[in-house]
Image: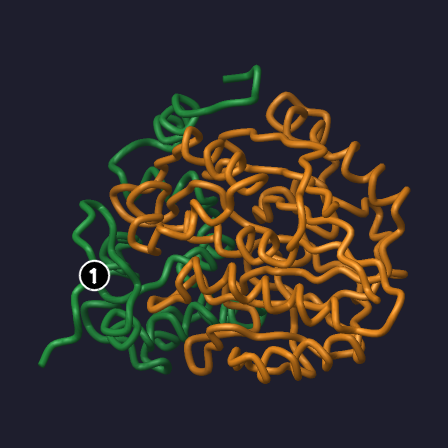
Chain colours: A orange, B green
Amino acid sequence: MAKIIGGIGTSHIPAIGRAMDQGLEDTPYWKDFFAGYPPVREWLAEQKPDVIIHFYNDHGLEMFLDKKPTYAIGCAPQYENADEGWGIQPIPPITGETELSWHIVNELIENDFDPTVCQDIKVDHGLTVPLSLLYPGHTYQGIKVIPVCINCERHPMPKPSRSFALGQAIGKAVESWDGDERIVVLGTGGLSHQLDGERAGILNTDFDIECMDKLVDDPEALLKYSNEDLTEIAGGQGVELAMWLGMRGTMHGKVRELHRNLVAPISNTAAGLQLLLNE
Amino acid sequence: MPVKKMRDIPGTTFFDGPMATKGFALNKMAFSFNSQEGRDAFKNDEEGTMEKYGLSEAQKEAVRKRDVLGMIREGGSIYYLAKFGQILGLNVQDFGGLQTGRTTEEFQAYLDSQGVGKDNG
């Protein structure tokens, strides 16, 4: 049986990609942020996962308002990144997955989730910045990535509780797959931030810490929040907690936290990092 | 019957269905800034590009004035508006300052005042 060995929550801020492009990791602004990553990279190097299931959100590279899926899942052999107008250098192609991904799609639809199924999508910084962070030097090519995209741009967005349930359904689908893949799940984005309006710049690191605490041993406690609640408490883009909830939902058993970091501000955002082991 | 209004949070415009309807042309133009070609087209002919995408007069006026709050009021989604950044040489701290009546330095200081986990403030 395929196994989800762990989950990683991480920020995906475009400025991180630019900082890596420019080699700024050790500068005063960035060093505390990048200092969080070596333990997670080392864990990945030890564990050597075969597949990454990657919860991310598209910020207007592939999924414009003309056709905007609420949930989308990729079943493609390869994904490409492209110029998205945010000044990040595109990264080399990402290897996809075409077997387990279709099994997940079958199981999701059988269990009343109806995602958009994608065989050719460009992936943006929401997916690429975390890969660059976790695999410096673009050393991710041996790993197969299954993208799961959540609309975090235009309301109505899926309820946070629904994204957690989507994660649970994906976790069950993986458990029913007769393969020996070892899988890591990423949930990227957040944590508290707001880019737009007179309220731009609000952060709420107390809430971010509460979320990271609850993600370990009581994720259901976070499901009471609506997207309007998250906007009020954690800023307009605080709704990106959805991806962390999806990630956590895939892990059914007891979860142990191996590592955490929270640095703010990075760009306009509180940048979280969390490594959870699925025991 | 009108579409249900989202919660009133001062300084926050929910980008919901009615705003997405209102802002479609503006957002579509900004979506074209994903490519260098699209960015160059706007840089070389702002008025012509706005006309091509069918922006409303209020949207055009907000773009001409680089009025970010105005663009949001006219249905702009921050994900697409941020793509103006490369054209105008503005980062998201500049955008933050423009929207909150602060200089970029003041906006950065506001962010720093809420910071954690860094020893540089």
Q: Quadrant of residue A247?
A: bottom right
Q: Residue at x 57, y 75 (%)?
A: A72
Q: Residue at x 58, y 83 (%)?
A: A109
Quadrant of the frame with the C terminus of chain A: top right
Q: How far across and how far down the image is residue A53, in percent? A: 70, 62
Q: Is residue A273 left or right of residue B107?
A: right
Q: Residue at x 89, y 51 (%)?
A: A48
Question: Who is closer to the viewer here, A218 or A19?
Answer: A218
Q: How far across and how far down the image is residue A61, in percent? A: 56, 69
In the image, residue A266 sits, relative to residue B23, either above or below, namely above
Question: Who is closer to the viewer here, A45 or B69?
Answer: A45
In the image, residue A10 sits, relative to residue B23, either above or below, namely above
**Disc 1 on helix, strand or loop?**
loop
In the image, residue A81 sits, relative to residue A48, either above or below, namely below
Q: Examine the rendering and report whether any part of residue B39 can be seen.
A: no
Q: Is residue B1 left or right of residue B37?
A: left
Question: Who is closer to the viewer here, B78 or A119?
Answer: A119
Quadrant of the frame with the N terminus of chain A: bottom right
Instruction: Give the letter of the chain under mark 1.
Output: B
Q: How far across and how far down the image is residue A98, in percent? A: 79, 79
In the image, residue A2 sits, relative to residue B89, either above or below, namely below
Query: Which amino acid is tagged 1?
Result: Met
Q: Residue at x 60, y 25 (%)?
A: A29
Q: Circle 1: is it few (<14), some (14-19), or many (20+) Cα within 10 Å?
A: few
Residue topped by disc 1:
B6
- The outermost residue toward the front is A253
Q: Examine the rendering and report whether any part of residue B87 can be seen.
A: yes
Q: Is residue A161 left or right of residue A116?
A: left
Question: Who is closer to the viewer here, A141 or A165?
Answer: A165
